[in-house]
Image (cartoon, rainbow, N blue to C red):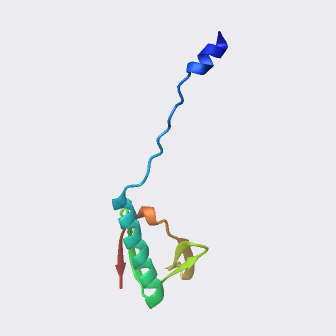
Amino acid sequence: MESQKSKHAKPIVLFLSTTSCSMLKVYKVKSDLLNQAIMESKKVNVTTYENGILKLKKVGIDAGKYFGLSRIKGKMQRMFLNINDIKKITLL
């Protein structure tokens, strides 16, 4: 009886959520602006989706992750940047 059930069992197909083309374009625009800031050594203002504004003195890339240098309490602090949390990038 069990062998008949296994013969007629239908496979379950799982659909993975894929990112849309527009999300990829937004990611590319943000990474291009950060790369431009790295090449030109420009200061950057970053607005996050939580409406926080980060004023970065310099932007760099380390092991494939973007980071920014910001002055906090008189010391330069390294802050890693998540591109998905960035709303707007302004080169100064």
**As rendered, which of 72 and 34 lies closer to the eye?**
34
Q: Quadrant of the N terminus?
A: top right
Instruction: Write the residue at 48% across / 45% down.
Output: 16
The image quarter containing residue 76 is: bottom right
The image quarter containing residue 88 is: bottom left
Q: Quadrant of the C terminus?
A: bottom left
Residue 41 in sight: no
Measured as percent of width and height from the top left, residue 68 is found at 51, 77
Q: How many marks?
A: 0
Measured as percent of width and height from the top left, residue 40 is found at 44, 90
User: Is 15 rendered above or below residue 35?
Assistant: above
Instruction: Write the residue at 42% across / 87% down.
Output: 42
User: Is 37 rendered above or below residue 1?
Assistant: below
Residue 38 in sight: yes
Measured as percent of width and height from the top left, residue 58 is found at 49, 84
Instruction: Write the residue at 41% across / 54% down.
Output: 19
Instruction: Write the residue at 41% across / 77% down.
Output: 32
**As rendered, which of 69 and 63 lies closer to the eye?**
63
